[in-house]
Amino acid sequence: MGEKIDKFNQFRSAINEKLLGANNLGIKRFFNLDTQAYSDGVLPVKIKELLGLVASCVLRCDDCITYHIVQCAKNNVSKEEFLEAFNIVLIVGGSITIPHIRRAFETLEELELDGALERAVANS
Amino acid sequence: MGEKIDKFNQFRSAINEKLLGANNLGIKRFFNLDTQAYSDGVLPVKIKELLGLVASCVLRCDDCITYHIVQCAKNNVSKEEFLEAFNIVLIVGGSITIPHIRRAFETLEELELDGALERAVANS
Amino acid sequence: MGEKIDKFNQFRSAINEKLLGANNLGIKRFFNLDTQAYSDGVLPVKIKELLGLVASCVLRCDDCITYHIVQCAKNNVSKEEFLEAFNIVLIVGGSITIPHIRRAFETLEELELDGALERAVANS
Amino acid sequence: MGEKIDKFNQFRSAINEKLLGANNLGIKRFFNLDTQAYSDGVLPVKIKELLGLVASCVLRCDDCITYHIVQCAKNNVSKEEFLEAFNIVLIVGGSITIPHIRRAFETLEELELDGALERAVANS
Amino acid sequence: MGEKIDKFNQFRSAINEKLLGANNLGIKRFFNLDTQAYSDGVLPVKIKELLGLVASCVLRCDDCITYHIVQCAKNNVSKEEFLEAFNIVLIVGGSITIPHIRRAFETLEELELDGALERAVANS
Amino acid sequence: MGEKIDKFNQFRSAINEKLLGANNLGIKRFFNLDTQAYSDGVLPVKIKELLGLVASCVLRCDDCITYHIVQCAKNNVSKEEFLEAFNIVLIVGGSITIPHIRRAFETLEELELDGALERAVANS
């Protein structure tokens, strides 16, 4: 029940805390810039998160995809919108992206389980 | 004056015509699917073209970037919106994308020249 | 006994069915084009599957590699032929492909188990 | 008349000579292994060169593509076979490969000019 | 206790032995060249292993990262040096490398456990 | 005479100035972080620039390679050290990096021309 996302978020939080606690200033600042890049601007958060999702899909990083799917869902990206974004991923990135799209689709299904989105957003 | 884009569009059209004339059905159908992926749906064309642009930037293909910049500009993506999209590219894809962002920025400047956008749209 | 391939094929079939049932026409058509690209033509299926395998290896996608290994084996690619293809992968793609070649080799060994190839082909 | 290929081969030969003359043993040995990987084995040279071409296309390296197109043509890969290979490239690697396929197609056309293949083979 | 690294090294050794026993001369020679590339030269082993680590991180291969972390640790790369190298990875490769850096950091922590480095070096 | 590097540096400076003048705070901050990542720390500048060079080579970005070659040369990386670094690039990244190594080698030769390094450093 929502296991994959929960597990990812727990690992992510635990290691991020240690990594940022290790006091490399450059790494800390990069993490700040990363957060700021998706904040509201002339492009709304929803669109920026979709951009982050598509970038993560064509670069084929499952953890990044899981993260941005949660943020997209939190910002009301609908299933149909996810599918149109995945279609662009498929076209630009080719069949090599299919295994990642399959796992992304499985993540989407997990998010439909009771409480999964709320829990994922709280932990991200 | 708008030279880079014009040259790209001429080469693109000339070879596409020959390539699609070579009668490989799979290639022809792929080109059709490619066009359809950016048509209006639950996500508007403007957002889809931004998704295509960001995907092209993180995968670092200058020709693809030029193509999607023209389509974005045609769909009223503003300079500020382009910059926020490039910022996401930088964060997701790192400094290795900077040379492509520089060339993309140069393309944006070309599009501001008299008639460049109109000509580019007509030829794309 | 052939566990890795069986598990992959089960997950692949289950999610593909849901994904294609989600009614995004572009995604469906892409999956069709994907299947057709490997059908018999002026290049025989065996060679096309080897091309798909090498492309999957240099792009480093384990699921894609597993899929094409099964198709290659079904089309009588021999162990020596697999090794010569992996050598080309190593040369073109470098040592970064080694972990994928190791897992590919493990998959090859699984296919030699009783009934593994028959089961894999039936489910792919 | 066959300019692009001639220019590529001249630059390639000139720098390879200097680079291999610089006496780094590892680099020299790598170049030897590279040559040997495409020699006749259980897979014939023609198939190995097609594998090298498809790998070069999905990894999107224009110089590598030019090199393997010449070797494929020398080993009697027909235009229809090239197109079926490019179709697989498109499917596996997506639209991001299209600009490379366009330039590859242009190279194919150059090879049809009088003497271009003979000259390219002599210089490669 | 040091489980991830131990598991990786066992799988790596077991399959490498079979793979190199399969008698493809090109693959064997590539493995030799790979080992030699990191041997002492005008650049010391420690720097070469750091180069291998950074290359593995930006190309995003977890197994390669684990391997080079062990070699770096064996050659006295300090935690602060690892972090400065990871900072360069983040800048060059972007946020898409973060999940790999997280797993790399977890590997570093494993190496601090009693006997983990000694065991890892013995098995690598 | 040193033309390639001069041209690159002029284009780089001209567009960077415009891009950073366009007032996207995220992009500006990223450029600052980028510069800082290569400053003296527990790892000296010379090693950091070598790490940046190898990362740029395996990710295959000619402009990034040119930039880091100049920085490496300025920090007294010798020709033999460059070659050992390129050997690691070849091993990790495969033959697909060869065209980039050839162009990198050409850049190295340009730097040996009278005044080329001084001019390149002044403009970078």
Image: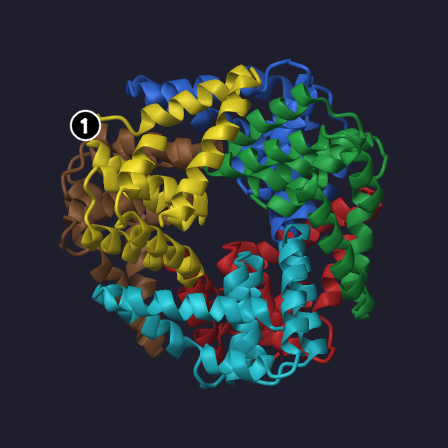
Chain colours: A blue, B green, C red, D cyan, E brown, F yellow
Q: Numbered disc 1: what chain?
A: F
Q: Amino acid at mark 1?
A: Val
On the image, the x and y values in percent for residue F112 come to 25, 50
Residue at 45 percent of width and 42 percent of height: F7
Mark 1 lies on residue: F42
In the image: residue E51, left or right of residue D8: left
**Image quadrant assignment for residue A29:** top left
For the residue pair C74 and D98, the one nearer the viewer reads as D98
**Image quadrant assignment for residue D38:** bottom left
Give the SS element for disc 1.
loop
Q: Is residue B108 above or below residue A117?
A: below
In the image: residue D79, left or right of residue A5: right
Residue at 43 percent of width and 32 percent of height: E98
| Residue C66 shows in this picture | no
| Residue A84 shows in this picture | yes
For the residue pair C60 and B96, the one nearer the viewer reads as B96
For the residue pair B72 and A94, the one nearer the viewer reads as B72
In the image: residue E93, left or right of residue E114: right
Residue at 21 percent of width and 37 percent of height: F75
On the image, the x and y values in percent for residue A68 come to 60, 28
For the residue pair F110 and D109, the one nearer the viewer reads as F110
